[in-house]
Image (cartoon, grey):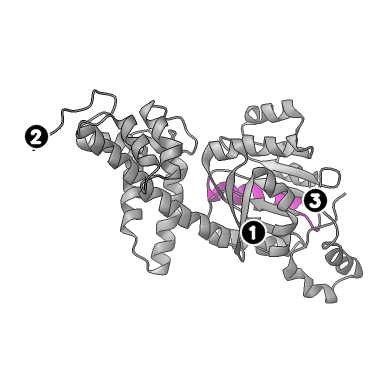
Amino acid sequence: MLLPLLPRSLSHTATHSPPFLTFLCRSMATERISPSTTRVGWIGTGVMGRFMAGHIINAGYTLTVFNRTLSKAQPLVDMGAHLAQSPLAVASQSDVVFSIVGYPSDVRSVLLDPTSGALSGLRHGGVLVDMTTSEPSLADEIAVAAASKDCAAIDAPVSGGDRGAKNGTLAIFAGGDETVVKRLSPLFALLGKVNYMGAPGKGQFAKLANQVVIASTMVGLVEGMVYAHKAGLEVGLFLDAISTGAAGSKSLDLHGSRILKRDLEPGFYVNHFVKDLGICLKECQRMGLALPGLALAQQLYLSLKAHGEGNLGTQALILALERLNNVSLESAPAAAPSS
């Protein structure tokens, strides 16, 4: 069984702790995470979580899963995962517990609920890894709560959408004890590239900044597509032409062809993006920061939610721009405007 992954912040107090805690802290340097020593738990098997958890199983780890809609976890059970009836039950059978759920309220429920939350079932030295995009202050609260139980918590939200989750190429933004993040590297490597950002909450701040960049990039992408269409260009040719120039971007690569095919299925839900941008704006207000591009993007995405389109993917932003301009990319390109 895996020796506990106590955070470095506890090593200072280890000199005043029982001898076994001091021993466990010293053991961190030599014990490696591996399928033979580490039991993994997974909470949240939605659009991205199901692929991410699948990588853990395929690498040979024993995996215990929980999802509120149990049927959504069935494909993982078919791959060999054990199904638990609560987050607490997941943690009681795991050394490291990952979570990727919808909203901060969900994070609080699945991790901190005193009767059913994962932390209540985690043994001393266990680790919580929350990959949900959530509030930095909540990440800090979870880290403090975990440390009080001689456990550790890492906030590690991700970027890359369903394609990155499926291919194991996600960008992972980690906040918390650096020693613990390094210890988790064999697991993170199965999901993508981990980037250590600093103390608890810094992973969330990095992901929120990432969302600020994506928000304005998506506005630029769909505006450019609508402009090209109105100018009489073949939009597909236009996207191919700009993809290798300065306007090329991951957003274009991920969403350009989907928009053209009218594939608005979620790689990342509009509802969740509205949540993320709302957290960004809340943090901006707290910091006294004005980001008008972020505010505009949030309003455009909020309009999709108002039209009942919150369960579409973020590429559905094209619908908002089409409505604003009374055009549709599905129609034939407009005649080129006269000089």
Q: Is residue 125 magenta?
A: yes
Check disc 3 and report the residue beneath it: 33
Q: Distance between the residues labelled 1 and 2?
A: 61 Å
**Of the residues shown, which amino acid type is indicated by label 1?**
Ile
> Residue 214, image x and y in percent?
42, 49
Check disc 2 and report the residue beneath it: 338
Question: Can residue 133 be seen at all in this image of the molecule?
Answer: yes
Q: Residues within 10 Å of mark 3 (few under 14, many from 20)?
A: many
> Residue 79, image x and y in percent?
73, 28
**SS assignment at label 2:** loop
Q: How far apart are marks 3 and 1 (CA)?
A: 23 Å
Q: How many labels does the image show?
A: 3
Which part of the image, by quadrant, shows the C terminus?
top left
Name, please, the residue furthest toward the right.
19
Q: Residues within 10 Å of mark 2 (few under 14, many from 20)?
A: few
Q: Which residue is pictured at 42% across the width and 68% down the height? A: 287
Q: Which labelled disc corresponds to residue 142?
A: 1
Q: Which residue is pictured at 69% across the width and 58% down the height? A: 181
**Of the residues shown, which amino acid type is indicated by label 2?**
Ser
**Of the residues shown, which amino acid type is indicated by label 3?**
Ile
> Residue 32, image x and y in percent?
82, 54
**SS assignment at label 1:** helix
What segment is highlighted magenta in the picture? 103-126
